Amino acid sequence: MSRAKRHPRSNSNPSPNLQPAGTPRYRYRVRFAKTGLLRWISHRDLANLWERIGRRAELPFSMTEGFNPKPRMQFPSALSLGVESLDEVLDLELCEDWPAKQLLLKLQTDDQPGLTINSVSRVDLADGKSQLAAMNYSVSLPDGFDDEESSRTVDAINQIKQQVTVSIERKGKTVTAHVETQLPILDLQPDKLIARIVVGDGASLKIQDVLDLLSLSDWPERGATIVRTGMNLKGEPEHS
């Protein structure tokens, strides 16, 4: 009995999901707010939400390569669960050249609760992926905050400002920040605590780290709301 001749599997056929070679790519920067109940969704769920919004808006996404293509989207910084933000950044790519205003209006029509589209701008692909430079935070005062706690908090802030560096332990590793350059703003105001965290070459502080350094770790449990009020990207004008 003769066996049927087995032909070697060809590797020359591209994935059926690939966009045609040479498909153009256009990158847009979306700045948006994530507030209310939306602050309780994870970063992965946020990415999935944006994909659904884009599909409902019938955006001509530029897709990644491979057998499981995904829309080309990038967040320069993942927001911690439970933290609100007034200024988040998403870079997304389309395969059609849309005016930024057209994309803005298209996204705003979705009207997702807790998601506010602030602006859309066109950015150059040659600039590479967006990189986080600094973050501004505001933390409301917790329930039961009184003059005694205010005095302790001011003292803790002054102690940090007198140090050259501060360090915290995270997942078995030590994260060290230079106070003057990487924590240039740390102040207790009448109704909130504000902080500016500048990103260093390695791991950088998070707002929860700052609360821990001030012995204020229980503030979120006592009703304080953490809000990221601004994000600055490298090579971009400062957003407050």
Image (spheres, rainbow, N blue to C red):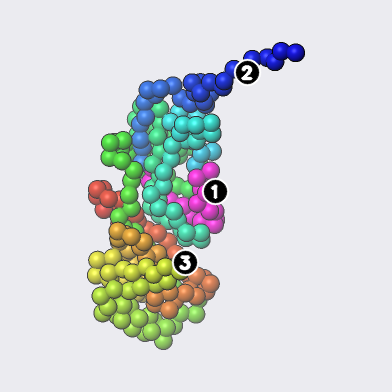
Mark 3 closeness class: few <14, some 14–19, many ≥20 residues within 10 Å = few
Dividing the image into 4 quarters, which one contains the N terminus?
top right
If you read the primary sequence from the N terminus, does the residue marked by circle 2 or circle 1 appear first? Answer: 2
Q: Residue furthest front?
A: 1
Residues at circles 2 and 1 in contact by the CB criterion of under 8 Å: no
Most frequent secondary structure within the magenta stretch: helix
Callout 1: helix, strand or loop?
helix
Judging depth in this view, the residue of 234 and 167 nearest the camera is 167
**Which percent across, then down, holds residue 154?**
34, 80
- Judged left or right of residue 130, residue 65 is right
Q: Which residue is mark 2?
A: 6
Dividing the image into 4 quarters, which one contains the C terminus?
bottom left
Disc sitting over residue 45 in the figure:
1
Amino acid type of the residue that numbered disc 2 sits on in the rendered structure = Arg
If you read the primary sequence from the N terminus, does the residue marked by circle 3 or circle 1 appear first? Answer: 1
- Is residue 192 in the magenta section? no
Residue 102, by quadrant, is top left
Disc sitting over residue 171 in the figure:
3
